[in-house]
Image: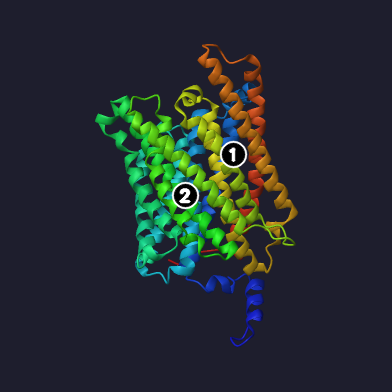
Amino acid sequence: MIPPNAPRETQDEAAVDSGEDSPWYVSVDPVRRYATLTFLRGSLVSLAITVGAGVLAVLFYIPGAASFLVRPGLSFAALRPIHTTFASAWIFLGGIAVVHHYLQDHGGATTSAERRRLLVQVSLWGLTGMGILVTLAMGISSGREYMGFHPAFSAAILLGWLLFAWNFFRAVGRGFWGRPVYVTMWGVGALLFIYTFLEQHVWLFKGVFTSPIVDLRLQWKATGTLVGSFNLLVYGTLYYVGEKLSGDKDYAYSKMAYALFGVGLLNSFTNFAHHTYHVPQSEVVKWISFIVSMTEALILIRVISDIARMSSRRKGDPFNSTRCFIVAAKWWTCAMLFTSLLLSVPPLNALVHGTHVVTAHAMGTEIGIDSMVLFAAVSWILSEVLTRRTGTDAVLHSPRMRFLILGLNVMAGALIVWLNISGIIVGYTRYQLLPPPEWLQSCNYYVFAGAGCGTALFLFALVATWLRIAFGRNGRLTSPV
């Protein structure tokens, strides 16, 4: 037993050697660190499920593999909603984990009521996640885009978000408007999700469901706002991690930061229109959507460039995976701007809508922008945990990690480029009232599957490393609630 008056370094080493939580854990409210690691673990598990379902789904593009996969009862119709649902869960849970990490420093001690709400939220979402996975695998689905799970699970998801918002605003409500912009983004993002999640379910009303045009308009408007809500979580995460890496606390109060917040919030209510150009609606709506989406893309490039420059590797500094992910997000944002242009210009939209160009846009933004930012956050949080637990975070910034990050970006880039090429060719031949060329169909089976599986391979390697740390011996957590 180490005496209480022993040097701090001795107590730290003893905690590590004994497998107990290190002083970093006990220096903050145990409920806060429980929440941070719990949601981080949930996000990584959701990402693993997303990648696994995506690999199986892409194999259906290969005729021989498809016939083999259907034997145990797998189907593309069941795998796709699993892939999209848990992709959204990965982003939301990852953002919420970062929010709780902020609360470790600035949220103060939790009350008994907060602990009860957190326990209910974690329990609800854990059970709901398992239920959604099982029912979707069984083919039980709503058939809705990005909301493919049965609506019976929606009440539990909504209640969890209400409890999260309650706890968040209780912790930061006092002086809320004087806090950094990322806190504002997180708060507005949480409220925006609750609103849009309710809007996602208006199809349950007979008057909406029996009117296809109204239903389509509302579905894509709600989906666009849903994307806007997790964009606010991700953008807030970018500011927070960038501030921690650079030490510059002024940027989160800058005019540029609030410009992105304002345009991003406006875009949340307008960016759906490039999905509904083909649906009867006002031309004014289309133009507002086009102009706002372009403005957000340009401001976002500026912000990510500024943060990447602030936290960039200085000469002589060792490789850092967190910084590398932020730099990757910068270049992905620049690249995805071109896809946004294609989708937002009405004549070009008519050419490529319903092709793999839309798939490339969705995957490119989720992998290249949202996920790269969250990968930076995961790497940073786990680096802090690992350093306090073992004294070194070298495994997270090793040559192996550099290779995995490079491989992931190369394979994901190849996948997005091919999807755009394929989609543009299909759109053009469709415009000419011709079938797609045979060479494209034969190549698509293997290029799409090969690039997709290659991307998944690097993702699995990264996630496996992070999961081992998140569920490590010293990271073992039991609910303190």
> Horizontal placement of 124 versus 385: left or right?
left
Rendered location of residue 282, percent (x, y): 32, 29
Residue 235's spot in the image, x, y percent?
49, 51
Q: Residue, x 71% and y 61% (percent of image)? A: 394
The quarter of the image holding the N terminus is bottom right
As displayed, is residue 83 above or below residue 398? Answer: above
| Residue pointed to by mark 1 | 335
Dot 1 alpha-carbon crowd within 10 angstroms: few under 14, some 14 to 19, many 20 or more: some
Q: Is residue 421 above or below residue 193?
A: above
The image shows residue 379 at horizontal and vertical percentages of 61, 56
Which part of the image, by quadrant, shows the C terminus?
A: bottom left
Is label 1 in a helix, a strand or a loop?
Answer: helix
Q: Position of residue 20 (x, y in %)?
A: 59, 71
Tell me which residue sits at (48%, 63%) in the image: 102
When the figure is inspected, residue 74 is found, relative to residue 403, above or below; the finding is above
Which residue is depicted at the point 73% across and 48% down? 403
C-alpha gap between disc 2 and disc 1? 24 Å
Q: Residues within 10 Å of mark 2 (few under 14, many from 20)?
A: many
The extreme front residue here reads 255
Instruction: Report if the CB atoms under discs 2 and 1 are less than 8 Å apart.
Output: no
Nearer the viewer's eye, disc 2 or disc 1?
1
Q: Nearer the viewer, residue 163 or 208?
A: 208
**The residue under label 2 is which amino acid type?**
Phe
Q: Is residue 412 left or right of residue 356?
A: right
The colour style of the image is rainbow
Q: Secondary structure at mark 2?
A: helix
Q: Nearer the viewer, residue 443 or 361?
A: 361
**Which amino acid lies under the numbered mark 1 shown in the image of this protein?**
Ala
Inspect this view and state whether residue 66 appears.
yes
Q: Which residue is mark 2?
A: 92
First in sequence: mark 2 or mark 1?
2
